[in-house]
């Protein structure tokens, strides 16, 4: 269904709202991050949630107004004391009183006589602001509101506070919000009456009014009924979208695959180790999916080094037995060639044709590879998303494996299904994703998890120390390197910054050079790829003992002999990052250590982070804690990845609503797959409101 006309007031451009000119519209478009090239609309203002509330209801006498309290006073204006001419650093003071005492109102740089106009001597005014003291006298500096006695009703006693951007005043934004909320259209209800009654929730429009125009601070609370309702709506719209993608992806367009076991047995025989229990289980789940007539849509989760590539290879070998081809897509050419290096010898041993396709290939080589793909001689094609460009014709593509390093959002999954290639889909991720996030971002996919580390991985001893113990750390490090160990030393910044009191990698390198001479080198993200490569190769060859680095070493570095990881300013790193960095050691035969150096004073959150890393090596447990400490936008790096960032829901408070939303979305589509009739139209309205209309064409009749 096209967008209902009733929603037009919310989809109009900001220019049509009173008081919005080109400059403000451009500012708001940037601030709200409107989708590609479109201007912001009234709906963006409606969805911009207050971060708190100012309560001006405390109307007392001056005598009962206490320090740092926000009060609303009814004052009699006595006299003005403007600053001497040209002395702008001296404030303009206004002396006033009520029956209980005196107060001064203070204005800095007040020019043009507006203070005298606003507060005429001898008249009464209502004044609202924060009380402070100066030389023992009560004063309010720059009151928030000054209102004539007969206009008291215009003073907002409970005032939402919004996140702002430079150039946008809260007064201007509040005005816009009021206009949009006053113009809210009639919107059909998509939540069942029984559920509404049970949860005691208001309607969507009433909830928006409570949050933006609250009569009491409780109305706008994150855990109040209004905000709960809106958070649920946002999750519900997201879950409906995922369920629609799922029904499109899975809808019996798959192929039941039949396996002979010939190729998979050869792959198993050529592996230098046997599969872990987790790998075995994942392979079985994938084979069951491939054998069923539905299309597979599965997420394979496993920590760094948990052996996902081998599971993918077993899946691709099974597909080859059934006479079809597979492709493995990685986010960068570097990662694609790493996968290819791992897979090629195993494929050769099993008699599988495996090729790598990159953008930098000579034309002749590229033509030869494309010919092999088109004829079916190539069973497995490895590459970046370039494998789906025009000009790449598969003989019979059966399985797409995406190694996504969490850059594979809903849009990309839709694009793959658009290809109409009825292929099965396996997405691998090395970011341990907590269950809540799996539901919100991958609710359309079945999930396999690899929990154990591969055999031979050593446990890592983790310690937390203050940088005050630098001398001890260096002495211990000298002893260990003398015994033949190698170490990483990670710093958060490349070079000194005037804003942060943090030791940079360059400074630390200079300090360590005094002790370790030419056995220490520096590597960071601003170096050319060749220079980085050269340093890394010398470290891997054991010519260097100590590598000072920024976080460039987080992914893809494998130096089995390195057994010590020192992370300086560990309090500045997120949990997922600390976990990834620590995973760079413990890959060889000797016992490894990770040392987290912090600088006092530590915040509560930073201490909790360091304690978590110290107490567990389980990536999934760490991810759950990360979610609690940081909120969900950061855990997946959602800001860049086209994943839904939430505007109304705050995961720490509203997380339990995801489960409701997931079950309700499933039930709604089971009962009404075509989303037809009044109930279906209400659900489609919900999807338009949360900009999920991308999925509306997927609704199938019947």
Image: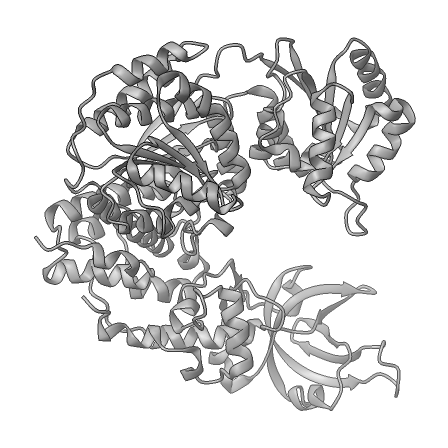
Residue at 50 percent of width and 22 percent of height:
305
- Extreme residue toward the right, this view: 514
- For the N terminus, give its image quadrant: bottom left
Q: Position of residue 228 (x, y in %)?
A: 35, 51
Position of residue 83 relative to residue 454, above or below, is below
- Between 266 and 599, the residue placed more toward the observer is 266
Quadrant of res 528: top right
Left or right: residue 439 compared with residue 127: left
- Between 599 and 348, the residue placed more toward the observer is 348
Left or right: residue 287 compared with residue 68: left
For the question of whether residue 656 can be seen, the reply is: no
- Extreme residue toward the left, this view: 702
- Between 34 and 256, the residue placed more toward the observer is 256
Q: Position of residue 471 (x, y in %)?
A: 87, 22
Quadrant of res 660: top left
Q: How many marks?
A: 0
For the question of whether residue 300 can be seen, the reply is: yes
Q: Position of residue 531 (x, y in %)?
A: 74, 38
- Extreme residue toward the front, this view: 364
Residue at 35 percent of width and 24 percent of height:
352
Left or right: residue 669 compared with residue 110: left
Left or right: residue 396 compared with residue 344: left
Q: Position of residue 242 (x, y in %)?
A: 28, 47
Q: How is the image coloured?
A: one colour
Residue at 46 percent of width and 27 percent of height:
620
């Amino acid at each position: 269904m096209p967008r209902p006309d009733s929603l037009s007031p919310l989809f109009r451009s900001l220019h049509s709202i009173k008081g919005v000119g080109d400059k403000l519209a451009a500012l708001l478009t940037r601030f709200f991050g409107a989708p590609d090239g479109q201007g912001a609309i009234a709906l963006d203002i409606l969805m911009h949630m207050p971060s708190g509330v100012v309560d001006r209801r405390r109307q007392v006498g001056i005598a009962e107004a206490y320090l740092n309290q926000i009060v609303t006073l009814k004052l009699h204006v006595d006299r003005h004391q403007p600053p001497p001419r040209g002395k702008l650093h001296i404030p303009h003071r206004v002396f006033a009183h009520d029956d209980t005492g005196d107060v001064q109102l203070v204005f800095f740089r007040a020019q043009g006589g507006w203070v005298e106009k606003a507060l005429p001597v001898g008249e009464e005014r209502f004044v609202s602001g924060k009380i402070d003291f100066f030389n023992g006298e009560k004063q309010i500096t720059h009151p928030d509101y000054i209102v004539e006695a007969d206009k008291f009703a215009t003073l907002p006693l409970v005032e939402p506070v919004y996140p702002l951007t430079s150039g946008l005043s809260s007064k201007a934004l509040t005005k816009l919000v009021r206009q949009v909320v006053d113009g809210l259209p009639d919107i059909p209800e998509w939540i069942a009456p029984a559920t509404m009654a049970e949860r005691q929730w208001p309607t969507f429009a009433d909830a928006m009014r409570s949050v933006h125009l609250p009569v009491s601070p409780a109305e706008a609370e994150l855990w109040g009924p209004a905000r709960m309702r809106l958070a649920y709506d946002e999750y519900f719209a997201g879950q409906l979208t995922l369920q629609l993608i799922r029904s499109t992806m899975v809808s019996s367009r798959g192929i039941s695959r039949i396996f002979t076991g010939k190729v998979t047995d050869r792959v198993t025989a050529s592996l230098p180790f046997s599969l872990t229990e987790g790998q075995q289980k994942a392979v079985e789940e994938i084979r069951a999916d491939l054998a069923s007539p539905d299309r597979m849509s599965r997420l394979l989760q496993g920590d760094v080094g948990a052996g996902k590539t081998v599971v993918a290879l077993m899946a691709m070998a099974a597909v080859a037995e059934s006479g079809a081809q597979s492709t493995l897509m990685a986010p960068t050419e570097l990662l694609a060639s790493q996968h290819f290096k791992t897979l090629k010898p195993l494929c050769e041993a099993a008699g599988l044709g495996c090729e790598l396709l990159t953008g930098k290939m000579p034309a002749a080589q590229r033509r030869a590879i494309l010919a092999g793909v088109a004829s079916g001689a190539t069973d497995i094609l490895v590459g970046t998303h370039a494998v789906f460009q025009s000009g790449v014709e598969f003989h019979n593509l059966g399985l797409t494996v995406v190694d996504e390093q969490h850059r594979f959002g809903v849009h990309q999954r839709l694009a793959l299904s658009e290809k109409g290639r009825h292929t099965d889909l396996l997405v691998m991720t090395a970011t341990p994703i907590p269950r809540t996030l799996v539901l919100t971002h991958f609710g359309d996919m079945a999930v396999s998890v690899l929990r154990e580390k591969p055999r031979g991985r050593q446990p890592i001893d983790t310690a937390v120390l203050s940088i005050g113990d630098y001398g001890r750390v260096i002495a211990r490090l000298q002893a260990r390197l003398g015994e033949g160990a190698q170490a990483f030393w990670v710093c958060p910044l490349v070079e000194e910054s005037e804003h942060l009191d943090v030791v940079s990698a360059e400074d630390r390198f200079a300090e360590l050079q005094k002790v370790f001479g030419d056995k220490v080198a520096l590597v960071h993200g601003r170096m050319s790829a060749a220079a980085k490569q050269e340093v890394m190769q010398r470290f891997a060859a054991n010519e260097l003992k100590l590598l000072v680095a920024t976080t460039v070493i987080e992914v893809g570095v494998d130096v089995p002999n390195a057994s010590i990881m020192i992370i300086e300013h560990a309090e500045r790193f997120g949990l997922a990052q600390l976990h990834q960095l620590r995973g760079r050691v413990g890959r060889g035969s000797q016992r490894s250590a990770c040392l987290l150096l912090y600088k006092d004073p530590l915040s509560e959150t930073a201490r909790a982070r360091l304690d978590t890393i110290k107490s567990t090596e389980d990536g999934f447990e760490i991810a759950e804690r990360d979610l609690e400490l940081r909120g969900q936008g950061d855990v997946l790096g959602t800001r860049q990845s086209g994943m839904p960032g939430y505007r109304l829901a705050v995961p720490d408070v509203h997380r339990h609503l995801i489960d409701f939303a997931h079950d309700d979305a499933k039930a709604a589509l089971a009962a009404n797959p075509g989303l037809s009739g009044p109930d279906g139209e209400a659900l489609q309205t919900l999807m338009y409101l949360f900009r999920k209309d991308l999925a509306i064409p997927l609704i199938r009749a019947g």
